[in-house]
Amino acid sequence: MKRTLLNALTLTLLCAAVAASFIWLQLDFSSLVTADGREQMARYVAAFFPPNTSPAWLAKLWQGALETLAISAIGTLLAALFGAALSLLAAGRMGTLARSLCRLLLNALRSVPELVWAALMVLAAGLGPFAGTLALALHTTGVLGRLFAEALENTPTAPATALREAGAGRIVAFLYGTLPGVLPQWLSYTLYRWENNIRMAAVLGFVGAGGLGQMLHVTLSLFQQSKASSVIIAMLVMVLLVDASSSWLRARLG
């Protein structure tokens, strides 16, 4: 009975919050269905067709797609390496103080959105893919470090303990007793974050971080809708292919 009342109260508060948001923001959806609104939207959408498929533009799209893939891959790889190192501290392997400080650092890294990191890195490192790579690496380090630490905490300690009692050192016990149990989870988490980073890398270009996102920003700014349409299609195809391949790999990892 108490649980039912709590659920009803929560639902009521959510509905009230949504209604208050609509009132506060003064959203007017009726403007979307007026004759002028429909005509304006139709003209805007029609300008995106047909997509630009000239060989020169397709070559630029290919380079932009490769740049986006490289940004996401390098950013994710750096994050996995730093996240794995920090997870040892965050899991309490080096003491309580190191655990608390490392968890605070990881929370700080992942609490700042990728777009904010990208804007800061563009100011620090200049326009281009380097800023996007750093932004993804910083945010993803916080995410993967926390996930890796939780995986370490939930891994049985019996194999590593047995190796330590047999005379093995801490590093050997970790490599042969702990790492085999967490490695499939770590790889699965890394692949999943790479999927997310592919999409985010395409968005980071709007703040000058390179890749397809920057091409989309430039074409939309110059009202070159046909070129922008080609960029959007390239983004969709790339994300679908990466999602499919990553899902297949994660399924094989169990």
Image (cartoon, grey):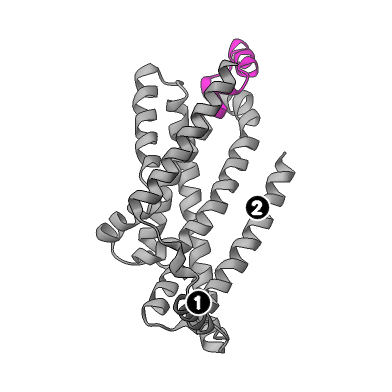
Q: Amino acid at mark 2?
A: Ser
Q: Residue furthest top?
A: 165
Closer to the camera in the image, 222 or 212? 222
Closer to the camera in the image, 166 or 183? 183
Range covered by the magenta-colored residues: 150-170
Residue 209 on image: x %, y %? 38, 64
Q: Amino acid at mark 1?
A: Arg
| Circle 1 residues within 10 Å: few <14, some 14–19, many ≥20 | few
Residue annotated with mark 1 = 38
Q: Which mark is residue 19?
A: none
Q: Which residue is drawn at the image coordinates 65% and 18% (left, top)?
A: 159
Q: Earlier in the sequence, mark 2 or mark 1?
A: 1
Q: Is residue 59 above or below residue 3?
A: below
- Between circles 2 and 1, the one closer to the viewer is 1
Badge 1 element? helix
Q: Is residue 44 left or right of residue 206?
A: right
Residue 58 on image: x %, y %? 55, 82
| Circle 2 residues within 10 Å: few <14, some 14–19, many ≥20 | some
Q: Is residue 237 above or below residue 188?
A: below
Residue annotated with mark 2 = 246
Residue 11 on image: x %, y %? 52, 33
